[in-house]
Image (cartoon, rainbow, N blue to C red):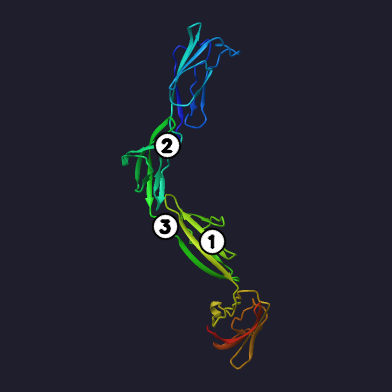
Amino acid sequence: MYRGIYVFIIGMCYNYALAQQLQPRLIDICKKDTTLLSVRCLDKTQNCFAASTWIWQTPRGTIEQARTLKIYEAGWFKLFIYQNLKLQWCDSVYVKGYVHELPKDTILCGTVLTFSPSQGIVNLWNVKSEIKDLQIRNSGIYSIEIQKGRCRHKDTIHVSIKPKPQQQFYTQQFCDHDSSKRIGPAQQSNWHYLWSTGSRSAQIDVQHNGLYVLQMYKPRECKLEQQYTITIKTCPCRLNLPSTIYPKSKVYFYIQPACPITMYRLSISDMFGNLIFQTQRITEVWDGTYKGSTCPEGLYQYELVTADRDGKKIRNGKIKLVY
């Protein structure tokens, strides 16, 4: 929260012909830097009060002979300029100060909010206690009085205390030849996601062993953390072989290898050993026909010869043809 400092001018006995009034401006005396008050002559020489006596009346007391005055606190600042003991010019300005920065409304997740005197906090009225490392343990609206230097301000802060969500831990294994190695929850509306990899998606694809941490949060809710321990291992190559084909439903004899195949030969025969179909192309399917004619329903034999990184394999089995 931000508060500024407004300057209000009340003219007294300034001389229009000599100098300008102390001009109104927006200043902030509660910062480390200070604000200057000075008089600007109307002539180009800037010597309108060269042989005069300057007297400032400030909240800190009287200051003499200062042509430029630093403002450190709120209050009235009056300038009297005399020449030969005669009042020649005067003006006044009132500076009202506020604390520059106030505590923000906050959500605490399973923790307490601690204030200490070093933060410039003077009092929390609704707990009727001056600050001595006071801890806020309950949700509510707290009235607070803050002082930094000579700047003092009163404000309220809204504190919501919610239970801290438990961390969630997952362990997942993938085979190196898996086409998808995706981890993470399903995408939810209004939720924000941040992975330890820098990704801001709900799910990510992983390529290496290790720990992956996801933080999930949405406005005015506590953060939820999930940790995924991932292991990617070398697995034997797999071939998914069908047991039944349905040509009318366009479900044919077709395999999908899980890793690269360097050799492939598929042979299908009837139960008497007569060859019906053979191919060396992994993308070619048996549709239940022989030389363009539909084969009868029933059992057929297959032989599948493949070679991959694990070596050469021969698989034999039966396939059922159903219409």
Percent position of residue 163, x then y: 38, 55
- Which residue is the site of mark 1? 212
Q: Residues within 10 Å of mark 2 (few under 14, many from 20)?
A: some
- Secondary element at tag 3: loop
- Mark toward the viewer: 3 or 2: 2
Residue sitting at the far front:
132
Q: Is residue 196 above or below residue 284?
A: above
Q: Residues within 10 Å of mark 3 (few under 14, many from 20)?
A: few
Residue 67, quarter of the rendered image: top right
Image quadrant containing the N terminus: top left
Q: Earlier in the sequence, mark 2 or mark 1?
A: 2
3D distance between C-alphas at marks 3 and 1: 18 Å
Look at 58% across and 92% down and name the residue there.
Answer: 271
Q: For residue 165, which numbered disc appears in the image? A: 3
Percent position of residue 110, x then y: 39, 53
- The amino acid marked with disc number 1 is Tyr
Q: Give the left or right position of residue 69, taking residue 106 as reference.
A: right
- Which residue is the site of mark 2? 120
3D distance between C-alphas at marks 2 and 1: 41 Å
- The amino acid marked with disc number 2 is Gly
3D distance between C-alphas at marks 3 and 2: 32 Å
- Secondary element at tag 2: loop
- Secondary element at tag 1: strand
Look at 59% across and 88% down and name the residue there.
Answer: 301
Percent position of residue 141, x then y: 35, 43
Q: Earlier in the sequence, mark 3 or mark 1?
A: 3
Q: Residues within 10 Å of mark 1 (few under 14, many from 20)?
A: some
Q: Nearer the viewer, residue 164 or 131?
A: 131
